Amino acid sequence: MKLGRVSVGIIAAIVALLAMFVVQALETRFLGVPSGRSLVMTFLGTGIAVFWLGDRLGLVASAYTEPSLGLSTTAANSGEDMPRDGQDEIRQRLDAMLPPNSVSQPTLLKAVDLAKSDIGPCEWNRLHNADLLTVSDDGQTIRWESKKPTYTGKHYPPAWVPASTRLKLHNGTFQWDFVVEEMNNAQIGVGFMLLWDVGADWGFFGYLGASPTAWAYDPSTGDVVSNTASIQGGLPKFADGRTGVVSVYLELPRSAAGTARFQVNGVACRTIGLPEGAVVQPAACFLKEGQRVRLAGFERT
């Protein structure tokens, strides 16, 4: 059982008060009068220690809510089919992306419809949000520095800034690293999404984990997120709030169900089930200026 952060905070405060009373009684008995400074330090130290211990023991619930739509925890980690409510939600959102009076229906891209060698180059897409993001000359590093003169958005900064690669992975086993060179002590998402014939489904506000067909690892919280909900928490965080590596492993058979895994600091998440013949695009999303991510170690076997 996991407790909410408010509940754990209340428990920590109660324990800290009890500890303070004990220290007060001891100082009164042996010193004649309690020290105000020691009481304050006891209260703060005990409260922080209780909250830290609860978090380390996995008793504190994630900042993300449990899944309620789209991929359930069971389905996401066992390869089962996506629940019906998640499929309907995706369908409604993708229908809205079609031209007016269109009679076609959005469908996921299939590996069988692509040449095995057609996976695209391993580099960031320079054209995606080019008025906010900058890609290095070799295409491997992308960063959000500051608003460019070409930016025409109504609000700045935007809620999230999505970034996509030019890869479309299928027909094979793949692995690569997202080297987060600067997280800037803020949330960031790195991961992948399934490709549709009408384009990628980013969900809302450009957050990578907002769609039921996208998965993001957030190293600020140690969560794997899909459809705006954590499908697995308690995973490693970046200790310094700035740098670290998130590795991704994909098994994408041509005509069978696939799988995916994230790994950080040698700890892998539970296996994520992917649909038959899936076509996958690595991507990321940024929350704060100064964030920077580099692609490394891309391999296909």
Image (spheres, grey):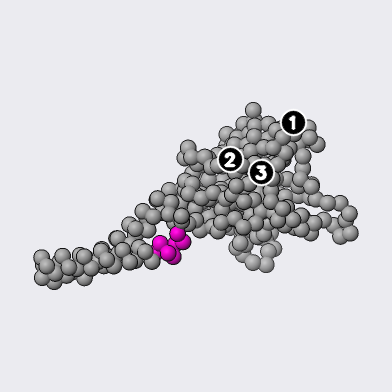
- What x and y, as percent, mark residue 202? 68, 54
Frontmost of labels 1 and 2 is 2
Q: Quadrant of the C terminus?
A: top right
269 shown above or below 212: above
Please say if the residues under marks 3 and 1 sit with CB atoms less than 8 Å apart: no
Q: Can I make out residue 85 in this image?
A: yes
Frontmost of labels 3 and 1 is 3
Residue that appears at 76% across and 58% down = 92
Q: CA distance from mark 3 to mark 1?
A: 28 Å
- Decide which of tag 3 and tag 2 comes sooner along the chain: 3
Residue that appears at 39% across and 64% down = 9
Graded by Cα atoms within 10 Å as few (under 14), some (14 to 19) or many (20 or more), the crowding at tag 1 reads few
Using the image, tell me which numbered label, if any, was put on residue 117: 1
Callout 1 amino acid: Ser
Which residue is identified by label 2? Answer: 271
Q: CA distance from mark 3 to mark 2?
A: 11 Å
Q: CA distance from mark 1 to mark 2?
A: 26 Å
Callout 2 amino acid: Thr
Frontmost of labels 3 and 2 is 3
Of residues 222 and 6, the one nearer the viewer is 6
SS label for mark 1: loop
Of residues 149 and 184, the one nearer the viewer is 184
Q: Which residues are magenta?
A: 3-9
Using the image, tell me which numbered label, if any, was put on residue 80: 3
Of residues 233 and 186, the one nearer the viewer is 233
Graded by Cα atoms within 10 Å as few (under 14), some (14 to 19) or many (20 or more), the crowding at tag 3 reads some
- What x and y, as percent, mark residue 118? 75, 34
Q: Is residue 165 left or right of residue 232?
A: right
